Image (cartoon, rainbow, N blue to C red):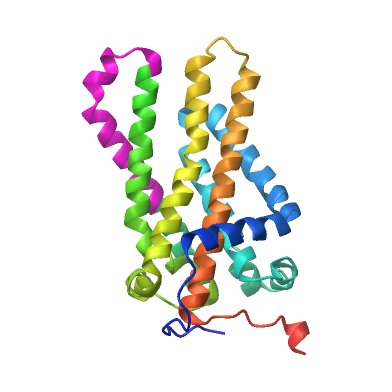
């Protein structure tokens, strides 16, 4: 059903409730999570460790695909069966993949993080040049972390645009911003908390690089794998919370599968 914005009948869930319920939802979908996460981790770690320049585009694309998948799992309890049904028609196959607006939103977020990081690093360039390697790496990480947090605070108010597109609401980014007013506090709070969780992985990777410089390459790859898994888990929790807040805001419920309706 296409959602019509309504005033929430009950108060929107708190950030703590969304996080707790998100972990519970994740624990019920272990098989699907680890199957998709394994594919994403392999592509992301390969891009970061093998492709020259870090394969930023590949990394961003995998995170966008993962976030789209996690949103659909959160919005449709029967997503696995629904995806098989959608795959039987060209239109269904199109709907089972991220739409153009989803890609644009994701890459815009990544671009803001990239430009913000480069700006902060350029500001600190003299200090980075004079610092030892370990201090320079920590300062660079701080720049990326600050840019990521700022990008999250900027984009979080528009996050309902993503589930709205999946639900067929036809919202613009401006519509999503206006409709999020009733759930803005938990929406921004959840996005910020999940971003902080996601930043733990890169921090561990930087610390491992600076403190274990003589360690074998396999150890650094293992750390990168763990960091990426933490990233994907944070993304899963955020996707669940955004889907839940969208449903609370609009009263949206998924239509039954054609077989079930029959």
Residue shown at the point (62%, 74%) measured from the top left: 91
Q: Position of residue 261 (x, y in %)?
A: 74, 88
Which sits in the foreground, 166 or 86? 166
Q: Decide: is 231 above or below 7.
A: above
**Whole-percent x, y for residue 162 in the image:** 47, 66
Judge from the rendering whether residue 167 lies leftward or rightward of residue 193; answer left or right: right
Residue at 54% across, 14% down = 212
Main secondary-structure element of the magenta-colored stretch: helix
Quadrant placement of the N terminus: bottom right
Q: Quadrant of residue 114?
A: top left
Residue 14 in view here: yes
Quadrant in the picture for the C terminus:
bottom right
Between 164 and 5, the one nearer to me in the picture: 5
Please identify the residue farthest to the bottom as the structure is shown: 262
| Residues in magenta, as a range | 108-134
Q: Is residue 198 magenta?
A: no
Vertical side of 25 occupied by 147: above or below: above
Can residue 116 be found in the magenta stretch?
Answer: yes
Residue at 65 percent across and 20 percent down: it is 218
How many numbered tags mark residues here?
0
State which quadrant residue 89 falls in: bottom right
Image x and y of residue 249, in percent: 46, 77
| 43 left or right, relative to 198 | right
In this picture, is 123 found above or below 211? below
Residue at 47% over, 57% down: 103
Seen as rendered, the residue at the extreme top is 214
């Amino acid at each position: 059903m296409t959602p019509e914005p309504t005033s929430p009948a009950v108060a929107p869930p708190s950030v703590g409730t969304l996080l707790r319920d998100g972990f519970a939802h994740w624990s019920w979908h272990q098989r699907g999570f680890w199957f998709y996460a394994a594919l994403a981790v392999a592509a992301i770690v390969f891009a970061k460790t093998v492709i020259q320049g870090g394969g930023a585009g590949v990394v961003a694309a995998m995170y966008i695909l993962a976030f789209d998948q996690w949103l659909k799992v959160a919005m449709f309890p029967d997503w696995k069966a629904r995806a098989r049904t959608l795959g039987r028609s060209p239109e269904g196959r199109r709907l089972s993949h991220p739409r153009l607006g989803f890609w644009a939103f994701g890459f815009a977020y990544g671009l803001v993080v990239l430009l913000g990081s480069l700006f902060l690093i350029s500001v600190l360039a003299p200090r980075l040049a004079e610092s030892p390697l370990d201090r320079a790496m920590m300062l660079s990480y701080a720049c990326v972390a600050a840019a990521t947090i700022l990008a999250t605070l900027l984009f979080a108010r528009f996050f309902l645009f993503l589930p709205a597109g999946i639900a067929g609401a036809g919202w613009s980014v401006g519509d999503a911003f206006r409709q999020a007013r009733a759930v803005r506090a938990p929406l921004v709070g959840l996005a910020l908390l999940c971003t902080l969780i996601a930043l733990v992985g890169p921090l561990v990777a930087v610390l491992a690089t600076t403190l274990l410089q003589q360690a074998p390459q396999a150890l650094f790859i293992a750390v990168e794998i763990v960091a990426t898994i933490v990233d994907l888990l944070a993304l899963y929790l955020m996707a669940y919370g955004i889907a839940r807040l969208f449903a609370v805001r609009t009263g949206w419920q998924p239509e039954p599968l054609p077989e079930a309706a029959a």
